[in-house]
Amino acid sequence: MTDKPFDPVAAWADMVQKWEQEINSWSTKLTDNEQFGAVVGNVSRIQLVVQRMVAEKMESMLATLAMPTKAQVEELAERMAGIEDSIDRLRLAIEARALTPGNAPVDAPPPPPEPKRTRKPAAKG
């Protein structure tokens, strides 16, 4: 007789392989019949109906509380991104114009108007 030393890794791998075969055999038997497909289809339909009902109730509750829905917040975020892009384009156009020769810097404020002289100097005499 040959005494092989105990290899825990090989024993573990063998146990896992047998376990996987049993699970695969069991799941194949379960999913092969038509009733399983019918049950899965019914559960999926029920889940969709419940999901739609929850969404409608949540939208109605948010409307009652005068709060925006997720879709409205996403739409607002898209609009804000568009506005930010427009502002960036305007800023770049203004900066490009300010750098062209003959244009005064955009950041420089106009000089203040000089006060009008309405009084005449006193006559010497």
Image: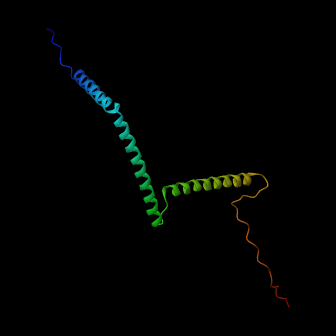
Q: Residue furthest front?
A: 34
Left of 94 or right of it: where is 77? left
Along the line of sight, the residue nearer the viewer: 52 or 119: 52
Q: Residue furthest top?
A: 1
Left of 44 or right of it: where is 86? right
Q: Residue at x 71, y 59 (%)?
A: 106
Along the line of sight, the residue nearer the viewer: 63 or 31: 31
In the rendered picture of this protein, how many numbered marks are placed on residues?
Answer: 0
Q: Residue at x 18, y 14 (%)?
A: 4
Along the line of sight, the residue nearer the viewer: 36 or 24: 36
Vertical comparison of 22 with 36: above or below:
above
Residue 122: give x, y in percent of width and height: 82, 88
Where on the picture, by quarter, is residue 29? top left
Q: What colour scheme governs how the chains and residues are painted in the rendered image of this protein?
A: rainbow
Vertical comparison of 58 with 116: above or below:
above
Q: Quadrant of the C terminus?
A: bottom right
Q: Quadrant of the N terminus?
A: top left
Residue 12: give x, y in percent of width and height: 23, 25
Q: Residue at x 53, y 54 (%)?
A: 74
Residue 95: give x, y in percent of width and height: 69, 53
Residue 86: give x, y in percent of width and height: 65, 54
Where on the picture, by quarter, is residue 37? top left
Q: Residue at x 51, y 55 (%)?
A: 71
Q: Residue furthest bottom?
A: 125
